[in-house]
Image: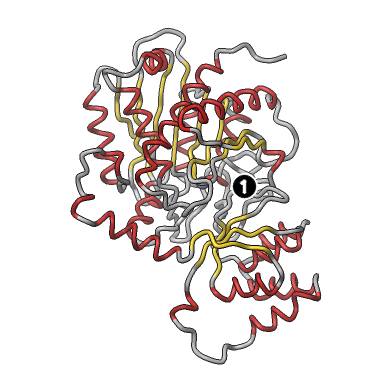
C-alpha cells in the first residue's frame, strides 16, 4: 500500500498518523513534538484562521505529511509533481514552514471570504437581479427558474423529476427535445460537489442560451441534433447546506456525514482515491449506488441511452477524460484525447482562457467516479470539466465570472457535439 493510500485510510486517527508519518522522516519529529505540546497560552481568535494555501510537495512523503496537516483538500485531482491546494490552520502553516515545504497563500481567510459572499447575497440589491446570471442562487430559486424556463418553451421543453435526494428534494432535469433527425442524447450535470456553485449556474446558462428564440444558428443546429438533458443540481441537499450552514460542504447530506457522490458509482468502487471513513471528504458510501442521487443518474444515463456527457465541477480549469481510477489507457483514449483537444481550443477561442487537458494517467487514482462509469459502463463520451477559477479564491468565484465561464463551457459542449459526428479514429 502506498503512503498516500495508507494516510487516506487512517486520517481519522490524525494524531497517530502524524506520529507514524513522522517516524518515516526523523527531521519531522521536532515539528510533531511542537504540534503535540499544549500551547502555553489559550488560543487567540487569530489562531483559528483557516487559510487556503498552495503547496509544492517535493516527494510522496512530503505530500503525505501535507495531507495530514490539511483540514481540507481543495485539489480534487492530484498530479504527481504538481502543487496542491489545502486548508490549514495557523499551526499547520507553521508546521509547513518548519518542514521547509514551499507554500503560498491562496486565500488568507476562507471564512471571511464566505462571510463577505453571504453579505453580498443577502443585500437587498441581490434579491431580484435583472440579469439572473449576475448572481448565484439557492436551490429553491434554481428550481423556480427551471420551471420558468420550461414554461417559456413548452414546445420543446419539459421539466422532469428524475429522482429524489436523501432529504427528499427533487432531482430536477430540463429535458429539451426539439424536432430533428439523428438526435444524440446528451447529459449536462453539475454540483455533485455542493460547494462548486459555478457548476450549477453553467448548465442552466447553456440551456437558456439554447432555448432563446433568437439563438445563434449554431445553437439552433445543436438543438436540432440533440436530445438534451440538463440537471444543474444533482446534489440538492448538499447544495442547500452550503447556503444555510457550511459554504465549503462537499458531499451529500446522507446520515449527516454525507457521501461523496463522485465516488459512489460502480466502476472500481472502493478502490484507491476513495475512502471507507464516513468523515472523509471522499467517503464512497456503503456500496455502489447506495445514494439516491447517484442511482437516479445511473437510471437516466442507462434508460435514455446518454451518448455524450459532461460532469461540471470547479475549480482548476481542467478538462479530464477517462480513466481516473487506473493508469491503464481507456479503450477510446485517443478519441477522448482528440476531442478534449478540440474542446480546449473552443474554450480558448471563446474567452482566451486555457483549460488544461488531463488524461487520467497523469493523476493519482480516483475510484467510483461518474465520468469513468458513464464511459466504462454506459459507453458515453464522458468528460469532467473543472470550471473557473484556475486558483483565485477557490470555490467562491466572483459572480461577474458566471457569464464568461458559461461562454467557454458552452463552446466546449458545442464542440463535443460536433466531434461526436466525426468518424472514429482507427
Ligand atoms: Zn467536484
Q: Is residue 205 left or right of residue 383?
A: left
Decide: few, some or many residues near mark 1? Use Cα within 10 Å; few <14, some 14-19, many ≥20: many
Q: How is the image coloured?
A: secondary structure
Residue visible at 55% across and 55% down in the picture: 74
Q: Quadrant of residue 244?
A: bottom left
Which residue sits at x=34%, y=36%? 172
Name the quarter where the C terminus is drawn.
top right
Residue 163 lies left or right of residue 378; in this view the side is left
**Vertical position of residue 240 compared to residue 133: above or below:** below
Of 175 and 43, nearer the camera is 43
Residue 400 versus residue 169: which sits nearer the camera?
400
Residue 97: x %, y % from top left: 66, 71
The quadrant in which the N terminus is found is bottom right
Q: Which residue appears at 56% of the width and 29% of the height?
A: 344
Compared to residue 33, the image places residue 218 above or below, namely above
Residue 99, image x, y percentages: 71, 71
Question: Residue tagged by mark 1?
Answer: 77
Side of 66 relative to 343 (left or right): right
The picture places residue 289, in percent across and down from the top left corner, at 53, 43
The outermost residue toward the top is 181
Query: Farthest residue in the bottom direction?
Result: 40
Total numbered badges shown on the rendered structure: 1
Vertical comparison of 417 with 236: above or below: above
Disc 1 residue lies near ligand 1 with CB under 8 A: no
Q: Residue at x 43, y 41 (%)?
A: 199
**Quarter where residue 335 is shown:** top right
Q: In the image shown, does 136 or 162 lie closer to the viewer? A: 136
Q: Position of residue 111 (x, y in %)?
A: 42, 65
Element class at badge 1: loop
Amino acid at each position: 500500500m502506498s503512503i498516500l493510500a495508507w494516510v487516506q485510510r487512517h486520517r481519522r486517527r490524525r494524531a497517530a498518523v502524524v506520529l507514524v508519518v513522522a517516524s518515516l522522516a526523523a527531521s519531522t519529529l521536532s515539528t510533531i513534538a511542537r504540534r503535540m505540546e499544549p500551547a502555553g497560552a489559550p488560543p487567540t481568535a487569530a489562531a483559528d484562521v483557516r487559510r487556503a494555501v498552495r503547496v509544492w510537495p517535493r516527494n510522496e512523503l512530503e505530500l503525505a505529511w501535507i495531507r495530514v496537516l490539511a483540514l481540507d483538500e481543495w485539489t480534487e485531482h492530484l498530479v504527481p509533481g504538481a502543487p496542491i491546494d489545502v486548508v490549514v490552520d495557523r499551526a499547520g502553516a507553521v508546521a509547513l514552514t518548519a518542514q521547509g515545504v514551499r507554500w503560498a497563500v491562496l486565500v488568507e481567510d476562507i471564512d471571511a471570504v464566505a462571510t463577505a459572499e453571504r453579505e453580498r447575497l443577502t443585500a437587498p440589491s441581490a434579491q431580484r437581479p435583472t440579469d439572473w446570471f449576475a448572481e448565484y442562487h439557492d436551490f429553491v430559486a434554481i428550481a423556480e427558474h427551471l420551471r420558468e424556463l420550461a414554461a417559456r418553451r413548452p414546445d420543446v421543453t419539459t421539466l422532469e423529476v428524475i429522482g429524489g435526494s436523501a432529504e427528499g428534494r427533487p432531482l430536477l432535469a430540463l429535458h429539451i427535445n426539439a424536432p430533428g433527425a439523428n438526435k444524440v442524447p446528451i447529459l449536462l450535470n453539475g454540483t455533485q460537489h455542493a460547494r462548486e456553485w459555478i457548476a450549477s449556474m453553467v448548465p442552466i446558462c447553456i440551456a437558456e442560451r439554447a432555448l432563446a428564440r433568437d439563438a445563434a444558428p449554431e445553437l439552433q443546429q445543436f438543438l436540432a441534433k440533440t436530445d438534451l438533458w440538463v440537471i444543474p443540481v444533482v446534489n440538492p441537499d448538499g447544495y442547500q447546506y452550503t447556503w444555510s450552514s457550511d459554504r465549503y460542504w462537499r458531499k451529500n447530506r446522507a446520515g449527516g456525514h454525507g457521501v461523496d457522490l463522485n465516488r459512489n458509482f460502480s466502476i472500481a468502487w472502493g478502490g484507491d482515491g476513495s475512502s471507507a471513513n464516513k468523515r472523509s471528504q471522499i467517503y464512497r458510501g456503503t456500496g455502489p449506488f447506495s445514494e439516491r442521487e447517484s442511482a437516479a443518474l445511473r437510471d437516466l444515463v442507462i434508460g435514455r441511452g446518454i451518448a455524450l456527457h459532461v460532469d461540471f465541477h470547479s475549480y482548476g480549469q481542467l478538462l479530464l477524460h477517462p480513466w481516473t481510477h487506473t493508469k491503464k489507457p481507456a479503450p477510446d483514449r485517443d478519441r477522448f484525447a482528440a476531442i478534449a483537444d478540440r474542446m480546449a481550443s473552443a474554450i480558448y477561442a471563446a474567452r482566451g482562457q486555457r483549460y488544461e487537458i488531463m488524461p487520467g494517467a497523469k493523476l493519482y487514482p480516483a475510484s467510483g467516479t461518474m465520468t469513468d462509469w458513464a464511459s466504462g459502463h454506459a459507453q458515453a463520451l464522458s468528460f469532467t470539466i473543472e470550471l473557473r477559477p484556475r486558483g483565485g479564491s477557490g470555490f467562491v468565484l466572483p459572480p461577474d465570472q458566471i457569464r464568461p465561464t458559461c461562454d467557454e463551457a458552452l463552446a466546449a459542449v458545442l464542440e463535443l457535439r460536433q466531434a461526436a459526428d466525426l468518424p472514429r479514429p482507427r
